[in-house]
Amino acid sequence: MTQKNRLKGGLINRNNPREFEFNGQSMQGFEGDTLASALLANDIRLVGRSFKYHRPRGMLSAGSEEPNALVELRTGNRKEPNSRATTTELYDGLVANPQNCWPSLNFDFLGVNDLLAPFLTAGFYYKTFMWPSVFWEKVYEPVIRRAAGLGSASLEPDPDCYDKGFLHADLLIIGAGPSGLLAALIAAMSGVRVIIVDEDFVTGGRLNAENYILDEQAGNIWAKGITDELSDFDNVKVLTRTTVIGAFDHGIYGAVERVSDHLKTPVSGKPRQILWRIYTKQAILCSGATERSVVFENNDRPGVMLAGAIRNYVNRWAVTPSQNVAIFTNNNDGHQTARALLNKGVNVAAVIDTRDQKVKSPDYETFSNAVISNTYGRRGLRSITIDHQDGTQRTLKCGALGVSGGWNPNIHISSHHRGRPIWKESIQSFIPDDNCPSGMLVAGSAKGFMELEEVIKSGSDVIKQALENLNVKAKSIDMPKVQGDVAQAIEPFWMVKGTSRGWVDQQNDVTAKDIKLAKQENFTSVEHLKRYTTLGMATDQGKTANISGLAIMANLLGKPIPEVGTTIYRPPYTPTAIGAFAGRSRDENFRPVRKTPSHQWAEERGAVFVEVGMWMRAQWFPEKGETHWRQSVNREVLQTRKSVGVCDVTTLGKVDVQGKDATSFLNLIYCNGFAKLAVGKTRYGLMLREDGIAMDDGTAARLDENHFVVTTTTANAVSVYRHMEFVRQCLLPKMDVQLISTTEAWAQFAIAGPNSRNVIRKIVDEEYDISNERFPFMACGQITVCGGLRARLFRISFSGELAYELAVPTRYGDSLMREIMKAGKEFDIVPYGTEALGVMRIEKGHAAGNELNGTTTALNLGMGRMVSKKKDSIGSVLSEREGLNAQDALKLVGFVPVETDDAVPAGAHLMNTGGPVDAGHDQGYITSACFSPNLNCHIGIGFLKAGDTRIGEVVRLVSPLTGHDHIVKVVSAHFVDPEGERLRA
Amino acid sequence: MHNLSPISPLGNRELISKVVGPYTISEVTAYSLASYSLRKGSENDAKKKLEQFIGSSLPDVMGSNFEKISSFWIGPSQWLIEAPIEIHEDLASELSEVSVGKASVTEQTDAWCRFDLKGSELATPLSLLCNVDVASFKGGEVTRCQMDHLGCFLICRDIKNITILGPRSAAETLYHAIIAALKAVV
């Protein structure tokens, strides 16, 4: 297909053609084109179908405000629905397809909706589909869901990567149009750090679309010159293809840089987009303005466009939507478009001006005091009907119609902190008030200045203010001399009288009739109007529609527009890919992976790993012939209890607590006493929350008079450390206590089982006596191992066996594990994983995360007496609340099945036998369960009302989730060695 | 001499060094680290003793001193001391002796993995990694930050040589993130 509508000139590189495909047709454009301009060049006006009525639609605008020309860009897993053709840079090999149409763009079956329009008015779904009620879920909703929406997602993982980054500046300038560029230049020369961003791939803004002359050069050349000058400054960063999507607290702005969207695929290693978080002291919003349409009958046909957009296509991209174009305007801007078309040799059918004899030109016909009352052409504009003031009508043939209803400043980002704009009569639109986000100033058209000279002056004035706020003296520069400026001379005109199906919001198919209906049904508040009609929603957020909708509502209410008000805009300014928010944190990189010191060794042993609080821990170590995980776990448990086993417990949190007041500090954070803990001893400790609920448990080992090592559970390592820092810094700031995490610094291994001492003896250097007498249960000490390496030894036991925990500097962890295995060979030592660890702690009746579940107290855990009454500690007072100390309070006990083969599933609830099974009669629940290879049956621990007094009782275990319903016997939670003889051996 | 052999945070016997465009990233394990916190009531004395030991004054907030034994500010009245591991393998014990109970000393050598990033314009890749205004660095700055969800220290030895200290257990994650950032900007 030839580029039938390509004109002379433009800012495209004709030496660099681009092949692309739309709707299965191959076409050609040029470097510098957007998909929209290339389609227009190839005489394609019909691009997609509308949201609700499936009406044929084409380009309305030339920028990010586009409501209609949405396409499915790319194919396969890179397919991106709802991509705006108007901002999609053309690249070689681009493939785009129309969306929201079936079976084809030209013949869309759901176009029947247009005929059903009388039944599909605004809010129809609030009033219909009421009967029969069962149909809603089974019929209506599925059908509506299928019909709703625009493009379709690929449903495949995005193959590209996204980055997130941080930029810092003194000044952020949003928009590189004339005011932004000038402000940036002054700021750069004044020495402040500037970031200037623009969503376009070239700077200049409207200078690229108009025929302005600045300092005797074309506007786009002037803009390029300033941009080149800015690039020479070290203190300036120019970011094109970057959209500021939101203003957040404390001078933080979100911006999406489309690094690779203009390429077929990103360069290897490069992100597709970067979500920047920009920190700035001052910001200047130079986001320009967006043209709005006029509402008249059938104003949505492909070929009906914004007049300023047509001018942009003509001047910048050298394309016209048709060789015969009419203009409909209420201001001088429409005439600018007519002149631009004529300059490029395009026929101007007529300019229909709602005003009285404002502009007359010998070059084209002007109809003053006239309006367009209807348009014709199903898949593209063919003709228009003009109504003259005297009541006569005429039909005019044209292939495109440029409409200008005035310009709306792009104030969105200025109201992201709930700043409400104010009405500016001279431009018939809203402008930002003085309630912008802190540190933000507004310049140029965004502030309501519509003539270039005042736009530039505004940029200069505002940058001086910004620099003054930064305590920097502004350098002065000569203001550029402007030629080609035209006063707007707008006269308000929003809707042609008598219009019914005239589109206000083209993306959501909101018509003038819908607004009338909203008024009729009393949805007159701006926010109600929006939600009732969907005006201003979806991907374009009503950039071309909001003000017109408000004006029509104001007219219906007989109120001035500012009295009707405006909605407040929210981030993001333009649609933003979820991938950009995720950055690199997806799939296997969703969160960091922490590896234990013995990870490599465990991998070599074929360990199966499990993620525990980001740590990868060995879950079990399968051996040859084992086909089921439980075989491995049973073997590990039995062998540990029979001889010796070793487990990497580095993941437990370790906090170094030092200082003269370290003991007092621990005495406060633990509910049990620590004041009398001797040097060289370890004590189990329970931390309570302020409300008396158990928070975490662990041990504190006293290495020295003023030096403790506190251990926490793996899962709570961070939260406990944070809690301790809070207590230190906020509750006890006068205490002499220093904390630092040492979780990472020490590799720690549990060696458990009757032969653990024999193994440890071969590791610990001879000068240290670890006999039961010299190193009894709960002893700790700083020793050396393997011929002189400093280490820490703790005689503590989670398994209930004679056990030690041995710690060395982490870099030696791998080597130590290998040494332990070597030393234990004669005792048939086994490594055990977290599963065996869990089985042994349940057999021993030790509470863990399942029991410390945020609802239980020390009393529930059977540790009520640990809460010392002789001292104050966090949570101790509130743990005495009556409700937490009821006679029938839950108590931790053990359970065994009455029938040996029955399971005891965790999560199952307990009921009295013979009683009802419901929540009101709930007696408790199982928290942890396993198969005990030592007892050769399933066992569980859990909470039972007054459980400590019900040992030997039989209760009913019910688990609707797993289908279990049988009786279990209440036993002591300590299934193995209840007297603790083994661990003291 | 003990018979245990160390592995690097990335799990190797040999240290990794990689060139990505104009940047070089190197895993470093040649230094011992220990934290030194002043105890209340003896701050001046403890500070003086440390300064005598390291041979230079202790840096102020966000500052560092690069000497044979270097020091970095890491919190109120708290510094991280760095010394060659060959000479000061058990740096924490040496500092404990120096402090004579007037400071709390904790061994930190193996708490961290260390990657040194060298090249010009280091602010560019680091802008994708952490929320730190590296472009404003002149050399000598130290700050805490987050990289790929990990709490890290950024130590600017000079503007072309920045050290990243990250949690040792997540060394592979951190290394992967740094490499990804380097590749994204070259």
Image (cartoon, rainbow, N blue to C red):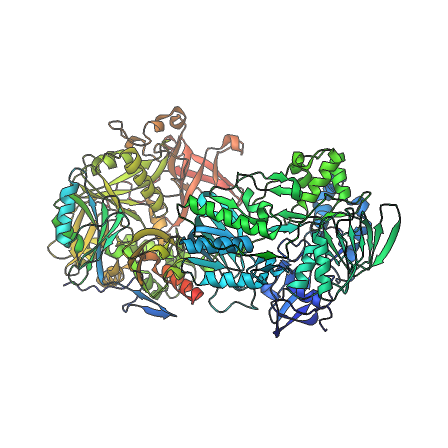
- Give the mark count: 0
Q: Where is residue A343 in the image (x, y as percent from the top left)?
A: 71, 64
Q: Position of residue A227 (x, y in %)?
A: 50, 61
Please give left or right for residue A953 compared with residue A152 in the image. left
Report the front residue among B110 and B3.
B110
The answer to whether residue A770 is visible is: no
Above or below, B110 against A570 in this view is below
Q: Farthest residue in the bottom direction?
A: A15
Please give left or right for residue A371 compared with residue A612 in the image. right
Please give left or right for residue A480 compared with residue B167 in the image. right
Q: Residue at x 30, y 40 (%)?
A: A725
Q: Farthest residue in the right direction?
A: A392
Q: Position of residue B30 (x, y in %)?
A: 23, 63
Report the front residue among A52 and A203.
A203
The answer to whether residue A27 is visible is: yes
Q: Which residue is drawn at 81% across and 48% down?
A: A370
Report the front residue among A444 and B59.
A444
Report the front residue among A199 and A541.
A199
Q: Farthest residue in the top direction?
A: A882
Q: In which quarter of the image is the N terminus of chain A?
A: bottom right
